């Protein structure tokens, strides 16, 4: 017999899962026992140890980000926005990413991880797939903060760079890729399923254009054997798309399909610059290939939208049958924002308000993310699911007037409208505060990381530009007295 504590949450509005889709349950009760939801319904039947009265609040499943870089994205802030070279079709991958990576230090990376975990939790994210290089630090913090993490310790056989701002070249080190794959396997041994079940592994070869076909295939085998997600960045720039056409005579998606690495546990990061997109003007076919392979797409709308690039279109991918999930990628790491931008971006591309509704993006942020991770016990408020829950305020600036809570969340809410968050049955956000986070220390550490990084920018830029040269201040400094 179980001795775990039973907590009932009585809420005015519950987004509950009926086995097929989300539904709105008015004045219902959710009972948590240990890490699991054991009851969802109109009333409580069995006795409980505690009842939380949230009759004036909204209870939803926790949100899922299937694409994040916890250890670096916060340092995108105040640096990468509004800048990009038309030479690289406005992608920031070739001029900004290598510079930031080179100028950032380990202490800064750890500051970013702390910041990211707090930022995600206070924004209602309960599960994140991280792609990074600090697996041990992320695993330890996942349990401490109480964030469910799929850790993709990333590796690759080469890297891109530009020496002149005109062309991108690739430098290869295949042994480094092999060693990275070995370390990913070791991460599974050491961390998967450990840390209070807050940590699992994802297998994350970095990018389609920086990994050999053999490395991509061997990594897929590791993911299949471990029954874990397999994720790779692909179709994320026109430069990459054209390079893959030059190397293989086919699109990145078609090449991945040829390698045999597209499947139900494959989660493609981005897949935006594809055949059929106006950015490539190349024949369509990639959407159908992805749909037939049964793979998922981690759509990180903001990192592209801020450069003037949209998926064409989220509605098309979704109706084709691709499992659509959302990612946060850069900063802000907000799935609320990701839902809003995904819906609006799709409406703009489709030139109609019916394309990609609040339901479509809320599904992507919950059920879609869960499906992409191979989990039928996440992303839903249902008996037997993990107790990953968000309690939203109802009487708040983003949630009033309350008639349709999901529309308010998708189109109006911010992290300020979140009251409590539970992950794996543990209360991790209370009154909007991340319980494990020392907010002032986290903000101070990130500020210090930026102040160490910005002066080093010039050493890593191909043209030797300093931070103001590469990313001019929004307004010039005040002159005079
Ligand atoms: Zn990424």
Image (spheres, rainbow, N blue to C red):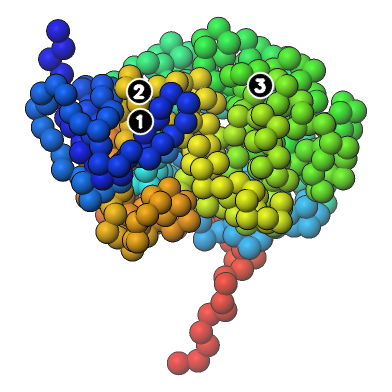
From the top left corner, tell me how far across and down residue 358 is, in percent: 51, 47
In the image, residue 311 sits, relative to residue 215, either above or below, namely: below
- From the viewer's perspective, tell me whether residue 36 is left or right of residue 120: left
For mark 1, give the secondary structure.
loop
Q: CA distance from mark 1 to mark 3?
A: 25 Å
Q: Earlier in the sequence, mark 1 or mark 3?
A: 3
Residue count near mark 2 (Cα–Cα under 10 Å), binned few <14, some 14–19, many ≥20: many
Circle 3 residue: 294
**Badges 1 and 3: C-beta atoms under 8 Å apart?**
no
Which quadrant: the C terminus? bottom left
Q: Gap in Å between the C-alphas at discs 1 and 2?
A: 7 Å
SS at mark 3 in the image: loop
Q: Are marks 1 and 2 in contact (CB under 8 Å)?
A: yes
Q: Is residue 298 left or right of residue 189?
A: right
Secondary structure category for the residue under label 2 = loop
Q: Quadrant of residue 240?
A: top right
**Residue at x 12% of width, y 15% of height:** 3
Outermost residue toward the bottom?
A: 481
Q: Where residue 266 sits: x, y (%)?
A: 62, 22
Q: Which mark lies nearer to you, 1 or 3?
A: 1
Q: Which residue is mark 1?
A: 381
State the quadrant of the N terminus.
Answer: top left
Residue nearer the viewer, 348 or 373: 348
Give x and y (percent) for residue 296: 62, 28
Q: Earlier in the sequence, mark 2 or mark 3?
A: 3
Residue with the mark numbered 2? 385
Residue 250, quarter of picture: top right
Q: Position of residue 301 (x, y in %)?
A: 60, 47
Q: In the image shown, does 218 or 337 lie closer to the viewer? A: 337
194 vs 52: above or below:
above
């Amino acid at each position: 017999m179980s001795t775990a504590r039973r907590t009932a949450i009585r809420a005015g509005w519950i987004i509950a899962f009926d086995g097929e889709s989300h539904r709105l349950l008015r004045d219902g009760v959710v009972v948590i026992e240990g890490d699991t939801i054991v009851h969802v319904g109109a009333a409580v039947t069995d006795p409980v140890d505690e009842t939380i009265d949230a009759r004036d609040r909204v209870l939803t499943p926790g949100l899922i980000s299937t694409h994040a870089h916890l250890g670096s994205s916060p340092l995108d802030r105040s640096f990468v926005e509004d800048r990009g070279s038309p030479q690289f079709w406005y992608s920031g991958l070739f001029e900004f990413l290598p510079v930031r990576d080179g100028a950032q230090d380990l202490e800064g990376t750890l500051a970013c991880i702390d910041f990211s975990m707090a930022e995600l939790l206070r924004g209602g994210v309960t599960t994140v797939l991280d792609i990074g290089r600090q697996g041990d630090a992320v695993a330890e913090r996942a349990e401490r903060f109480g964030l469910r993490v799929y850790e993709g310790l990333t590796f690759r056989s080469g890297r891109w760079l530009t020496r002149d701002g005109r062309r991108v070249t690739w430098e290869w080190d295949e042994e480094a890729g092999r060693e990275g794959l070995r370390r990913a396997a070791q991460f599974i041994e050491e961390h998967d399923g450990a840390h209070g079940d807050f940590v699992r592994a994802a297998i994350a070869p970095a990018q389609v254009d920086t990994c050999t076909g053999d490395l991509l295939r061997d990594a897929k085998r590791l993911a299949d054997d471990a029954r874990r997600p397999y994720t790779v960045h692909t179709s994320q720039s026109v430069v990459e798309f054209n390079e893959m056409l030059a190397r293989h005579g086919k699109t990145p998606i078609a090449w991945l399909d040829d390698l045999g690495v597209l499947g139900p546990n494959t989660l493609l990061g981005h897949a935006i610059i594809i055949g059929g997109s106006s950015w490539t003007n190349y024949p369509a076919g990639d959407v159908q290939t992805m749909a037939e392979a049964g793979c998922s797409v981690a759509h990180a709308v903001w990192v592209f939208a801020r450069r003037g690039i949209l998926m064409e279109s989220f509605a098309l991918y979704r109706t084709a049958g691709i499992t659509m999930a959302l990612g946060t990628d850069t900063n802000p790491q907000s799935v609320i924002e990701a839902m809003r931008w995904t819906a609006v971006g799709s409406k703009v591309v489709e030139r109609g308000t019916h394309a990609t509704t609040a339901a479509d993006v809320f599904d992507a942020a919950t059920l879609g993310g869960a499906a992409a991770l191979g989990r039928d016990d996440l992303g839903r408020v249902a008996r037997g699911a993990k107790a990953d829950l968000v309690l939203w305020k109802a009487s708040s600036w983003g949630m009033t007037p309350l008639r349709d809570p999901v529309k308010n969340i998708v189109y109006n809410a911010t992290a300020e409208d979140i009251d409590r968050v539970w992950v794996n049955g543990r209360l991790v956000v209370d009154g909007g505060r991340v319980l494990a986070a020392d907010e002032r220390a986290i903000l101070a550490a990130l500020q210090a990381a930026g102040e160490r990084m910005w002066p080093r920018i010039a050493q890593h830029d191909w043209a030797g530009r300093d931070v103001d040269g590469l990313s001019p201040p929004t307004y010039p400094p005040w002159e005079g007295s």
